Amino acid sequence: MATVLDQYNQKKVQISAQIAAGKFPAEQMLQYQEMLYRIDVLETCMSFCRTAPVTADQRVLGNHYRLFDCFLNCVLQERRFGYPTDEAGQKQRETAFNNFLTVINSFRKKFQSFAPKSQDEYRNIITQMIETILPAWMAYRNTFVSL
């Protein structure tokens, strides 16, 4: 997660300098906007990992998980635009979305009856969840705008 985020942030600095100098091609704006969106999602996911409670109190864990699940719902719904594609590309998008959804739903099932056995179990599992979800999300996003 951090490696991709670092790469995107480095690219953002380069592009910001080009934009400030008036030398950034307008036809690359969709890719730039996609990169900014990905930075936001990756940073938000890092924040969820870092703020995951270290406790066995299910009320506290439930609050954190509900907030993360709401974030996932937004990610599932938003930014369904990109470069036009043919029928094969549409099928590729659909397949990538279904794979992404399958990964999310498998973890959602795990959390339906989650009962931590240790103080740090939730933090470990939510971090594992995020590290598993992000590659599926990136593959899905690449079907719209490949970076």
Image (cartoon, grey):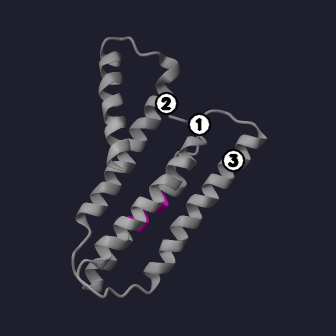
Q: Secondary structure at mark 1?
A: loop
Mark 1 sits on what residue? 82
Q: Would you say the residues marked 2 and 1 are in contact, meaning their CB atoms lie under 8 Å apart?
A: no
For marks 2 and 1, the one nearer the N-term is: 2
Q: Residue type at mark 2?
A: Gln
- 113 sits to left or right of 49: right
Q: Which residues are magenta?
A: 68-74
Which dot, 1 or 3, sits closer to the camera? 3
- 144 sits to left or right of 131: right
What secondary structure prevails in the magenta region?
helix
Mark 2 sits on what residue? 31
Compared with 117, 87 (above or below) is above
Give x and y (percent) for residue 119: 23, 82
Mark 3 sits on what residue? 92
Q: Residue 86 lies in what quarter of the image?
A: top right
Of residues 109 and 70, the one drawn nearer to the viewer in this rendering: 109
Marks 1/3: CA–CA distance: 13 Å
Q: Secondary structure at mark 3?
A: helix
Q: Who's the residue at 28% across and 83% down the image?
A: 59
The answer to whether residue 54 is seen in the rendering is: yes
- Packing grade of label 1 (10 A; few <14, some 14-19, many >=20) is some
